Amino acid sequence: MATPFDKYAAKGNELLHLLAEDLQISNEKAFRILKAVLHVLRDHVSIQASVQLMAQLPVAVKGVYVEQWHVNAAVKKLHVPLDFFNEVCLYDKSMALQDFENYAAVENSVKAVFRTLNYYLSNGAFEDIIAVMPTEIKKLIENSIGKNRMVL
């Protein structure tokens, strides 16, 4: 008999498998990429936007989102997608060279994370995130998810 914890883990694994399938990579690599993108995202949105986003994530993914989060830290400003990609590589640390062969791979991975999150987040959650991003990063996110919310 499955416990509630097993159900939480299964839903988190479902998200992870979707991302891995989209990128045609291992779950381990998908996890590192998901974690890096979520951590960059949370550092660039308000606590309120983070809480609204987390409310819709699978419980296991919420844990990834908040891992090593310094809630009192000031919200950093991004200017262009390259800034976002650079920070994803920094969060991925020593695995960045293994996970991304170039910036096109980083961009593709970031877009895949947003596409995957699109299955779990309401339009309002994405609108809250997009609203605080600079124009070029807004376009990156919007181009990643398209015009409509996808439902599993």
Image: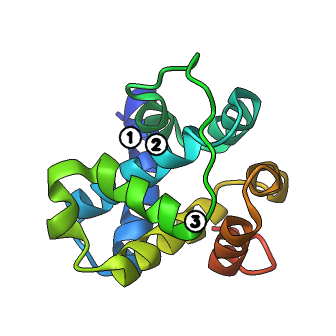
The residue that appears at 58% across and 65% down in the rendered structure is 114
The quarter of the picture where the C terminus appears is: bottom right
Query: Tag 2: residue type?
Result: His
Measure how far apart labels 3 and 2 are at the Cα level.
13 Å
Tell me the amino acid under the disc marked 3: Phe
Q: Residue at x 49, y 73 (%)?
A: 112
The image quadrant of residue 1 is: top left
Circles 3, 2 touching at the beta carbon (< 8 Å): no
User: Disc 2 and disc 1: Cα gap in Å?
Assistant: 20 Å
- Dot 3 or dot 1: first in sequence order is 1
Asked whether, in this view, residue 25 is left or right of residue 42, the answer is left
- Against 133, residue 98 (above or below) is below
Tell me the crowding category of disc 1: few under 14, some 14 to 19, or many 20 or more residues within 10 angstroms, Cα based: some
Q: Is residue 62 above or below residue 141?
A: above
Compare marks 2 and 1 and give the one earlier in the sequence: 1
**As rendered, which of 26 and 6 lies closer to the eye?**
26
Q: Residue at x 69, y 71 (%)?
A: 136
> Who is closer to the viewer here, 120 or 107?
107
Q: Which mark is residue 101?
A: none
Q: Is residue 34 visible?
A: no
Q: Which numbered tag is attached to residue 9?
A: 1
Query: Is residue 146 rendered to the left or right of residue 95?
Result: right
How far is disc 3 from disc 1 in space, using C-alphas?
20 Å
Q: Residue 97, relative to residue 43: is it above or below?
A: below
Q: Nearer the viewer, mark 3 or mark 1?
A: 3
Q: Position of residue 93 (x, y in %)?
A: 22, 49
- Residue at image mark 2: 39
Quadrant in the rendering for residue 109: bottom left
Q: Give the residue number, with chain letter if any, for mark 3.
A: 114
User: Which of the two discs, 2 and 1, sits closer to the camera?
Assistant: 2
